[in-house]
Image: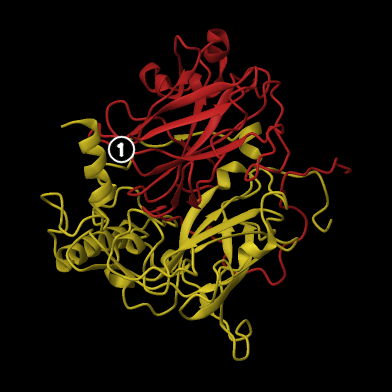
Chain colours: A red, B yellow
Amino acid sequence: MAREELRTPVSRGRTVENPPADLTPTPGQTIGPFFGYANAHEEVGLPYRGGPELVSRAHPEASRLHGQVYDGAGDVIPDAMLEIWQADPQGRIPEETGSLNRDGYTFTGWGRQAVDRLGTYSFTTLEPGAPGQGHAPYFLMVIFARGLLNRLFTRVYLPDDEQALADDPLLASLPAERRRTMIATRLDDGSLHHDIRLQGDRETVFLAYPGIES
Amino acid sequence: MAVEDHAEKNLDEENFTAPTVTGPDAAADRQADINREVRQHQEQYRVSGARESQPRLDYAPYRSSVLRHPTKDPHHTDPELIELTSPAFGHRDVHDLESDLTVQGGGEPIGERIKIRGRVMDSAGRPVRNQLVEIWQANAAGRYIHKRDQHPAPLDPNFTGVGRCLTGDDGSYEFTTIKPGPYPWKNHRNAWRPAHVHFSLFGTDFTQRMITQMYFPGDPLFALDPIYQSIVDPKARERLVASYDHDVSEHEWLLGYTWDIVLGGSNRTWMEPEDEN
């Protein structure tokens, strides 16, 4: 069947030549402490200048998604790295390249940031539209940290449309107190605040997907 | 304790940031204590009859994991829309030269020149095409360029230890680099990490996103390393070990290793024949 050519990477068609007999997924490992840093003066490793700025702060629809990452003792984790992947405000999934070398105009939907010494992250982005009917809009987030032996996935839902949140199938399947850990808070300044807790009473809900062991 | 002090404590417990051990418990355990805990996990796994292909998140021999693993079960969900897609990277993002870590400084880095190559595929063996692969590693002396790595080994002014490439249409990737050295850390007394290269990988679905470490065959530190041993299944651990490949080695130039990477199953299904290419 004909399909419109996507720029998004796809795996399809034939297998690689002489595929290995064992196709069990490769294990993950911790990101460790030395994955790098990016600041105004230099960048080393995975984080890069412009990583957390999916749009310019001057963009009329620019929004801030920010928070802190905590461990099971309630202490901040100063060596975590977060990524977000999201739809645009119309709910469309971006297919544009250029996230690592932003041109200042193209919305690629993906961002990365190493938290600072106080475990704080802050993305400047556009708020996603609903990804489909009956679903509330959210950012997909992946968390890496020293001491965390494999990545964790979660969703960060926008808090505004209560009906959409009530109707969302994933949120509906969670008890109320767990559900809250996936919904951002709208602050008075208009920004979205959302903390990640790897462990403890208010532990964030992390997701498992079919075929992806965690 | 002020938030800043907590942050400092959390930064310092594993790294050589200061000449002395900082926390009361840091590096207090002996290797024999770690080995005993590692064996307990192995034995518990052996008798469980279960099969695990990934590291355990709750793995106390790796001390930093104790407060950083979730204690509640992950919530199972079918991926939808944004989860079934992945960001796209292209030649705007990555320069061809970024896959050669030996040409980034003003001169030749010191150490054993190697090439690492392999394929990125999904669990059906289909190539992940035109996708980003990132690596980072210590230099030949076991030192990272990082403000928090202060272990007393030399930096190499001609080596950043950071590389990127895009996979080819056949899912292939290739890096030319220097073989990293093992390095000490503060998990316990006399703790050493086996030599490794960190890999960061994207699939066709964002749910396939992963970060891992590639090791070198025959490393005597494998049995002693709680990060490697956090994968309790012996076959699964071996999936992180590259093979020496004489066909990749180049005459009077470098030694070659191959390492294929399998990402968890793509949950997208395509309405097209399997032999379409």
Q: Residue at x 68, y 60 (%)?
A: B167
Q: Please tell me which residue is depicted at 41% across the width and 57% down the height of the picture.
A: B51
**Label 1 secondary element:** loop
Depth order, front residue of A95/A204 = A95
Quarter of the image where the N terminus of chain B is located:
top left
The quarter holding residue A116 reads top left
Depth check: B136 or B51 in front?
B136
- The three-letter code of the residue at mark 1 reads Thr
In front: A148, or B152?
B152
Residue at which label 1 appears: B71
In terms of image quadrants, where is residue A106?
top right
Q: Is residue A207 left or right of residue A6?
A: left
Q: Is residue B77 left or right of residue B275?
A: left
Q: Residues within 10 Å of mark 1 (few under 14, many from 20)?
A: some
> Against B111, is B261 above or below?
above
Number of numbered labels in the structure image: 1
Q: Position of residue B97 (x, y in %)?
A: 66, 64
Q: Position of residue B257 (x, y in %)?
A: 55, 77
State which quarter of the image contains the C terminus of chain B.
bottom right
B81 up-or-down from B226: above or below: above
Label 1: chain letter: B
Along the horizontal axis of the image, is B103 left or right of A192? right
The spot of residue B88 in percent (x, y) is 69, 45
Identify which residue is drawn at 36% across, 58% down: B49
Left or right of residue B169, residue B67 in this image: left
Work out whether residue B183 or residue A21 is closer to the camera in this orientation and state it.
B183
Pick out the residue farthest to the right.
Answer: A2
Residue B11 in the image, given as x and y percentages of width and height: 28, 47
Where is residue B260, by image quadrant?
bottom right
Q: Residue at x 33, y 39 (%)?
A: A117
